[in-house]
Image (cartoon, rainbow, N blue to C red):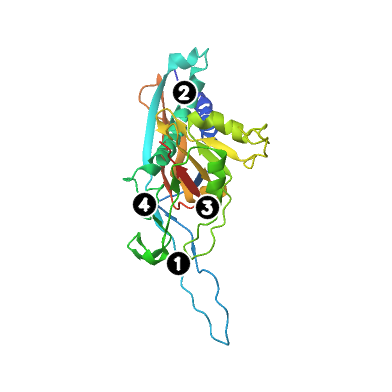
Amino acid sequence: MIGTSWKTDNYKFVGKAFDTAYANRMNKLSPVIGEVNAKSADYELTGTGGYGEMPLYVGRTLNEGQQRRAFKTIITPDEFTLSIGVDYKQAKIDKLGETRKVGQRLGDSASMTVYLHVLRMFANAFNSSCLGGDGQPWASASHPVASKASSGRTFVADPDAGTYSNTGTSAFSVAAITAAQARANRFVTPDGLPFLCEYDTVLVSPELEEKAKRFFGENAKLLPESANNDANPVEGMRYIVMGGGSDGFTEKQWAICDRRLMKETVIVAYNTRPTVFNTELDNPLVDMFTGYVDFGVGWGDARQIIFFDPS
């Protein structure tokens, strides 16, 4: 008589392979993408804010301040699933480890689903129809610096606070990188203070990876393409390829960012992190595994990154 104990053994293999495959995929983005547990219908990602510089204390008169705020982004997680059946005979004569591969492949599907949504978020940085909490696309020449009030869950821009640009058309080069670093140090926070940042990471398209290796690799102490063997001012920076297949940056697109601030303001919000379930079926000869993830992606600020599209 065929029992169902074989299904229990399968789950041990599938579950472990699933978790390993997911972690390996997502580690590539972890330096610049934060993760939170939302546990709600949506997640509110609020930008920075503060009270600004303190005025001089004169006499016994207190200086009352007012908070200057950034904007709020609403991230709404969605559910994604994929189910794969394993036959009893397939598991019994599993000489090629197909049962373990079910877990690995479901893990790949789960991680690639999250990964592709992140790539598309970066690709849509230049899309005028994909707006953030400040009413602008992520890469914009007219981001409002601060909000002045809120209408429901939407924050209203303060026109008196001005705007800033986090986009450009420079081709990927050492000169463009150092210019962007200087430019970022002129940004201000919503309350008017200097935006303290360290633009230490570059995001590139797959086509620009070869150039990034020459700029930031182990043998990059000297300025690439320099006839005078000048010191390389960007040696030691990190780079991440932000593209794959038809998603992410196009051939000439790139960006530079502060990876610490990116993890605080660019996130994957999970209601349920990728997992695999063993589904009970009436058929004792089929074991069903379902990969599941409930998540959304979003950004809450734009000062920590500058995008470039030379095309």
Q: Nearer the viewer, mark 4 or mark 2?
A: 4
**Position of 249 compared to 174: left or right?**
left
Q: Residue at x 48, y 35 (%)?
A: 242
- The residue under label 2 is which amino acid type? Val
Please name whichever residue, 88 or 113, is drawn nearer the observer in this view of the structure: 113
Check contact, mark 4 vs mark 2: CB within 8 A. no
Q: Quadrant of the N terminus?
A: top left
Marks 1 and 4, how far apart in space? 19 Å
Q: Is residue 129 positioned above or below 210 on the image? A: below
Q: Residue at x 45, y 51 (%)?
A: 302
Determine the image quadrant of residue 150: bottom left
Q: Residue at x 35, y 43 (%)?
A: 127
- The residue under label 3 is which amino acid type? Ala
Residue receiving disc 3? 184
Q: Position of residue 236 (x, y in %)?
A: 65, 40
Q: Is residue 260 visible?
A: yes
Q: Position of residue 182 (x, y in %)?
A: 56, 51
Residue receiving disc 4? 136
Q: Secondary structure at mark 1?
A: strand
Marks 2 and 3, how far apart in space? 46 Å
* Label 4 environment density (alpha carbons within 10 Å; few <14, some 14–19, many ≥20): many
Q: Residue at x 57, y 57 (%)?
A: 196
For marks 2 and 3, the one nearer the N-term is: 2
